[in-house]
Amino acid sequence: MRKVAVIGTTAWGTTLAMMLAARDMEVMIWARTEDEAARLNRDRENAAHLPAVSFPERLRATSSPAEVLERADLAILAVPSQTMRGNLNIIKRHLWESTLILNLSKGIEIETARRMSEVITDELGSSSDRIAVLSGPNFAREVVQGLPTATVIAAANIKFAERIQKTISSPNFRAYVNDDIVGVELAGALKNVIALAAGMSDGLGYGDNSRAALITRGLAEITRLGVAAGARPLTFAGLAGIGDLVATCTSQLSRNRFVGQELARGRPLREITSSMSGIAEGVDTAAAARRLAHRLGVEMPVTEQVYRVLFEGLAVKEGVPALMERELKHEVSADIISRSVTLG
C-alpha cells in the first residue's frame, strides 16, 4: 500500500500512523481543526495523547478530509465509537471506492446496539467486504515503544485481512487474521465493561482471587452474547477475547480499569471522565451491551451490575458483592457447550 489515511488523532491511531510512516509509506492523519493539524505538524508529536514521541519524517497532519483521503489505499478509522457516524458523515463524500477501511474503535453504538462495522456499512452504503477491524491487547504506549505485541485483523473477506496483515506486521508487532468479524468486534468492545468491574473490585481492595473470578465470568458472558449474535466461541479464546480482556482488566495503562477503581473510591463518574485525556469506551458500551443482551435474551450479570453503578446510582460496594450472591449454577453454559461440540 502506498498511501494510508488515519482518521482521528487518538493515541492508537497516531501509533499506527507512526509505525507505517516509519516504513516509508505516505501517511496522513486527519485532525478535526486547522489549529490541531498545524500544531501536530509544528511540534512533530501528539502531545495530548503520546507526549515526547516524535513523528517520523513522512507523517503529516491535515484538517482537510479531501486531502487526507486522496488516492488513499487504506483508511484507518481511529475515532471514539459514539462519534463514528458523525465522522463518517464528514469524510464519506471524499472516500474513494477503491479505498479499503480498517476500524480501530472498540465499542457498540448506544442508540442502535450496532457494531462498528455495521455502522460503517450503514453510513457508507458499501459492501462489508471492504471493511476490516483490528483488535487485541494493544496499549498504544507499549506499541510505540517497540515492545513485542500481537494483534488480530478480522474481515469477512480474509484476503483483505491478509493484505493488512502484511502491511502492518513487523518483528515487534505480529498480526494474525480471523474471518469472525462479529466475534472480534464484540470481544474488543465488551472487555471494556468487564475491565470497569475489575477496576471496581480492585478499588474495593478485593484482591487477586476476585479479579480472576471477574475476568473468567466476564469472559463467559461475553462469549454467551457473542454466540447469540453469530460469533464463534473459539474467537473469545484468542487475542481479541481473553488476550485483550486480561490486559485491560489488569494493566495500569487501562482507562476502563482506572475508571472502575476511581468509582470504588467514591469519585463521581463525570469528574473522573472529564479529567482523562482519552475515552473509557466501556462506559457507553455498558449501556449498549445491556440493550443488545436484552434484545438477544442473554444473561450478562457482570454487565448488568456495571450498568446499574454507572447509570442507576447503585453503590460500587453493593454492586460487586451482588455478583457473589446469585443463584448457584453450572459453570459452563449449555448453549456454549453445544455450539463448541458442533464446531468441533
Image (cartoon, rainbow, N blue to C red):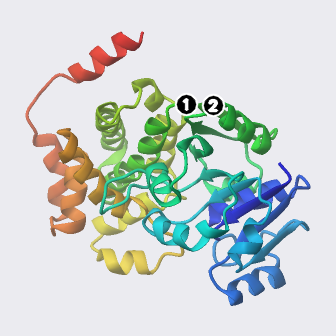
Looking at the rendered structure, the secondary structure element under dot 2 is helix
Asked if residue 54 lies left or right of residue 289, the reply is: right
At 30% across and 42% down in the image, what residue appears?
210
At 21% across and 40% down in the image, what residue appears?
296
Q: Quadrant of residue 151?
A: top right
Residue 205 appears anywhere in the view: no
Question: In the rendered structure, which disc, 1 or 2, sits on the residue that comes first in sequence?
Answer: 2
Say few, some or many: other residues with alpha carbon within 10 Å of mark 1 (under 14 / 14 to 19 / 20 or more): some
Q: Quadrant of residue 63?
A: bottom right
Residue 250 point in image, percent of width and height: 47, 48
Badge 1 amino acid: Asp
At 73% across and 82% down in the image, what residue appears?
37
Residue 104 point in image, percent of width and height: 58, 54
Q: How many marks?
A: 2
Residue nearer the viewer, 291 or 254: 291
- Disc on res. 179: 1
Badge 2 amino acid: Ile
Say few, some or many: other residues with alpha carbon within 10 Å of mark 2 (under 14 / 14 to 19 / 20 or more): some
Above or below, 342 relative to 313: above
Residue, disc 2: 158
Residue 327 point in image, percent of width and height: 8, 34
Looking at the rendered structure, the secondary structure element under dot 1 is loop
Quadrant containing the C terminus is top left
Q: Quadrant of residue 177?
A: top right
